[in-house]
Amino acid sequence: MTSSLILGIESSCDETAAAVVRGEHQVLSNVVASQHELHAKFGGVVPEIASRAHIERILPVIEDALAQANVTLTELDAIAVGNRPGLIGSLLVGVAAAKTLAWAARKPLVGVDHVRAHLVAAALEDEPIAYPAVGLVVSGGHTSLYHLNGPTQLHVIGRTIDDAVGEAYDKVAAILQLGFPGGPAVDRLAKQGDPAAVKLPRTLLAKDSLDFSFSGLKTAVLYHVRGMPTGRGRAAQFERDASELTDQQKADVAAGFQAAVTDVLIKKLGRAVGRLREQGTAVHSLVVGGGVSANSALRARTQTFADEHALALRLPKMKYCLDNAAMIAALAVHDLQAGNTADLSLEAVATTGS
Ligand code: KG4
Ligand code: ZN
């Protein structure tokens, strides 16, 4: 069963994706149709446009994934779909496609939690993860810390109380007029900047808190770049905008922001590992996933952290950091093994506790 052949389908946000995976490691195909170009001019994902694009792309993407893997529907052991959390209209497209295929091909259907799937992405085309572990998901929609005892045995030990890290990256990119999606642009620009040139806050919340808050940092960047506003909300008028900054000044803001974000993430990882070990819980690995796990500074800092704390660092390969369907299929292997399958009443769910 652990070498089951699974078709994964992912459509929770603005990537239409399908993949065929054998067991939890062997990726036979991984097709991702990104919609970034459709949303770029709006500066963020427009849900209506996303659902429409998913409808147009889902069948060709699934056909491509099967063809590239050289696998037919009848050979599959199951069809898995990320059915939660995400944009409801987007999720519905993947769920409807998965249900239809499962019904037509008489295959088991597995509904997968997208955020949890990010936590097994590091095992794709790589070694199994050694548990227990501390998990960190940093994406456009989520920033959460986990105590992991296995791919499906996990509990949340901390989460953001306001913005997700990826969201903060995207907003800072918008403030600096770098385009969408902003994370990779801020990451690139930060390499040219001095992280100490602009002093930005590190919000750590209560002394032992494992939760995160990034909205203060985002606002500090906004005021630094655009000056103090007069008026509130949509009526706010700013003194200037990013076009008045030199390239070096912009790079310094990007570097300062990135340093503040990574400082906070590393600090919270330290608290999480410290707390679990104080409680007598073994922690063997640090598992990171989600779009921001592609970030160069975070990858470097988590490596140093893992070395200092005698942890095996598990970062996904770059192509598995961002949304993909291989991770959906990889997590479904465990559900299928546990008999945890769904029927045609499987629903798309916009929010979950993960
Ligand atoms: O996991 P993901 O593809 O989608 C969600 O589940 O939300 O994450 C997308 C997020 C976006 O906010 C994007 O700006 C961010 O990941 N991101 C990055 C980098 N690459 C993508 N953030 C910082 N540095 C990067 N290199
Ligand atoms: Zn994601």
Image (cartoon, rainbow, N blue to C red):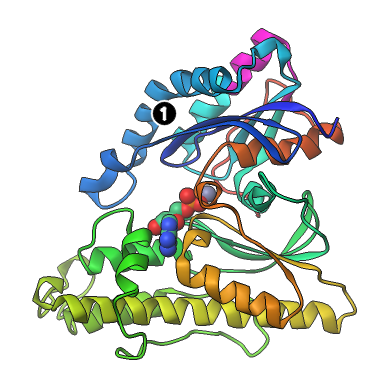
Q: Would you say residue 100 sits in the magenta stretch?
A: yes
Q: On the picture, is 133 further left or further right than 11? A: right
- Residue 253: percent from the left, percent from the top? 28, 79
Residue visible at 78% across and 28% down?
4
* Tally of numbered discs: 1
Front residue of this view, candidates 2 and 98: 2
Residue 120 visible in image: yes
Quadrant housing residue 258: bottom left
Q: Which amino acid does label 1 sit on?
A: His
Name the magenta segment's main secondary structure: helix
Front residue of this view, candidates 82 and 21: 21
Front residue of this view, candidates 250 and 201: 250
Residue visible at 75% across and 66% down?
285
- Residue 245: percent from the left, percent from the top? 13, 78
**How many other residues sit within 10 Å of disc 1, few (<14), some (14-19) or many (≥20)?**
many
Residue 163 visible in image: no
Residue visible at 53% across and 80% down?
264
The N terminus appears in which quarter of the rendering?
top right
Kindly identify which residue carries mark 1. Answer: 54
Q: Would you say residue 263 sits in the magenta stretch?
A: no
| Residue interval drawn in magenta | 98-109
Element type where label 1 sits in the image: helix
Q: On the picture, is 247 further left or further right than 144? A: left
- Residue 235: percent from the left, percent from the top? 15, 69
Residue visible at 68% across and 75% down?
306
